[in-house]
Image: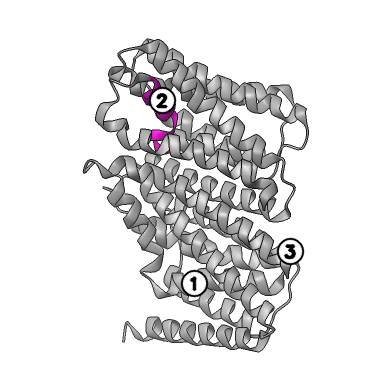
Amino acid sequence: MRRYAFRYALILSLSAVLLPAIAQAHVDAKSFQLIAGIVHPWINLDSGFTLVALVLWLCQAVKATDLIPFILIAAGLVTGDGVGILLGTSTEPLPIQIVTLALALCVTLSYLPTRRTWIAVLTFAAFLSGCYAGCDAARDITSPTLFLVGVLSGGLIFPLSAGVLMAERTSVMLRVSVRILGSWIVAIDLMVLALRLRA
Amino acid sequence: MTDLSHQVKHYIMRGSLALLLLGAPQMALAHSNVGGALSFVTGFLHPFTGIDHLLAMLAVGIWGAQLGGAALWMLPVSFPLIMALGAVAGILGLPMLATEPGIAASVIMLGVAIASNLRLPVLGATAFVGIFAIFHGYAHGAELPKEADVLPYCAGFVLATGLIHLMGIAVGMLSRRLGSPLLLRAGGALIAGVGVLLEARLMLAPL
């Protein structure tokens, strides 16, 4: 137990830092641009699910090169977010659902992509979905630089650390739990897509 | 024993962390009466409101634990996926025959599978459960309120469904650990009995 105490302490501290920020996000987002940026990728359930799917996917990584697709896709998401914030125009929420569905399917099937085309498609789709999330937040931003630094930390560094911490574990139960969670996200996204189609 | 309790402590800790993170978005919504919180709760409560759905999902978990091995995770992974496909059919209004009798039949068949300790290969068990998952998903999909905040509602709904599976697995694992398979089989018979009552009620309803 003691062996993992440091990791749990780290995750708990990160959560403790994030939770009050999340609670305050609606209240005073304009004053604390860095905090608003950290919280921004997690505040909406759709982009939150995308990041959860990315973390789960990273948990399945077995070697260092497995990190490459993850980093590219996460970078696409964050860059898209930045572009969206700068553009500030309205876009459709569909790309983010499709990206989440693709990522969660990879998690459920425990598939780590090796083909460059597949990685490129996912990265581009992540970029598009990032654009959507960014456009959505653009109207509340007073300091884009601070906000984007926050987005980079919240959308890339936090899930990367959490995923790497978890990926170190080889427990069968963990692998199974990751796939079960992935299947839940696929199910949620399928239903959301159908409901949006009906609407 | 020490290893097991050590592992259990780890899982409890991880579970608590996961719940903490899952609860985080709700904290953000707690400040204002923005839509989402209600929809999440509504979606979460939905699977608990019908005894037929509740028993079938519980039975899937119990049967998975009874079968053991890969079935332990294959069933809870495949059930929500296939159920979501059924829900898509329901949401889009595609035609489906005998949804309610199919759901009642699922309670009977899954109860019988547990009571008779039916041993199927993993793929066979997945297909068996998958057929019924379509009926459950279709019914849920058709019932989805149009005014619901879509994503929180679906998140709550799938989360609750998954938790019921996990409850079933916990019951099955506990029974195995206590060395009381007969008790579990009796539980399966009880589930099948309730299924028969549900089916009978459906057949007598038009009369």
Residue sitting at x 54%, y 32%: A99
Question: Where does residue A159 sit, x and y in percent of width and height?
Answer: 56, 33
| Pointer 2 residue | A133
On the image, which quarter does residue A54 sit in? top right
**As displayed, is residue A81 above or below residue B57?**
above
Residue B12 lies, in percent from the top left, at 57, 59
Look at the numbered discs 2 and 1 and tell me whether their residues touch, using CB distance below 8 Å. Answer: no
Image side of residue B177 versus residue B89, left or right: right
Residue at the image position 71 percent from the left and 72 percent from the top: B67
Quarter of image, res A112: top right
- Mark identifier at residue B102: 1
Mark 2 element type: helix
Is residue A3 or residue B204 the one in the foreground?
Answer: A3
Magenta segment main secondary structure: helix
Residue B120 visible at all = yes
Asked if the residues shown at circle 3 and circle 2 are in contact, with their CB atoms under 8 angstroms apart, the answer is no
Residue type of the residue flagged with mark 1: Gly
* Amino acid type assigned to the residue bearing label 2 in the image: Ala
Few, some or many C-alpha atoms within 10 Å of disc 2 (few <14, some 14-19, many ≥20)?
A: many
What residue is disc 3 on? B3
In what quadrant of the picture does the C terminus of chain A appear? top left
The answer to if B206 sits in the magenta stretch is: no
Give left or right: position of A173 versus A194.
right
Badge 3 density bin: few <14, some 14–19, many ≥20, Cα 10 Å: few
x%, y% of residue A185? 52, 46
Secondary structure beneath dot 1 equals helix
Q: Is residue B173 left or right of residue A137?
A: right
- Secondary structure beneath disc 3? helix
Amino acid type, label 3? Asp
Q: Please give the range of residues in magenta.
A: A34-45
